[in-house]
Image: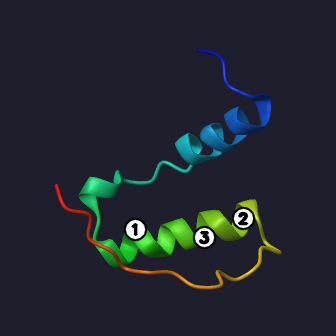
Amino acid sequence: MAVDADLQKVLDMIKEANRPAYKDISLEEARAGYQVMVNLLDPDGEDIHRFEDRTIPG
């Protein structure tokens, strides 16, 4: 399946970063890596207004 050219650029950047899989790193490392990615993709992004921790049964 073909993907949008801009999305393909992001996927290529992730692949080229040669980072370990999320299953192989700690939660703290995963969060830090995610934050780096968010800052690269949207450096002027707005802060999240709020969030809620929820548990969904099932």
Q: Is residue 49 above or below residue 36?
A: below
Q: Amino acid at mark 1?
A: Ala
Q: Secondary structure at mark 3?
A: helix
Image x and y of residue 22, in percent: 34, 56
Please say if the residues under marks 1 and 3 sit with CB atoms less than 8 Å apart: no
- Rendering coords of residue 9 (x, y %): 72, 38
Q: Which residue is mark 3?
A: 36
**In-image side of 22 versus 40 (left or right):** left
Q: Quadrant of residue 4?
A: top right
Callout 2 amino acid: Leu
CA gap, disc 1 to disc 3?
Answer: 10 Å
Q: Is residue 31 left or right of residue 14?
A: left
Residue that mark 1 sits on: 30
Dot 1 surroundings within 10 Å: few (below 14), some, or many (20 or more)? some
Of the residues shown, which amino acid type is indicated by label 3? Val
What label does residue 4 carry, if any?
none
**Residue marked by disc 2:** 40
Q: Earlier in the sequence, mark 1 or mark 3?
A: 1
Residue at the front extreme, as displayed: 57
Q: Are marks 3 and 2 in contact (CB under 8 Å)?
A: yes
Closer to the camera in the image, 31 or 47:
47
Residue 5: x %, y % from top left: 78, 29
Report the front residue among 27 and 15.
Answer: 27
State whether residue 1 is above or below residue 28. Answer: above
Distance of label 2 from label 1 (alpha carbons): 15 Å
Mark 2 nearby-residue class (10 Å; few <14, some 14–19, many ≥20):
few
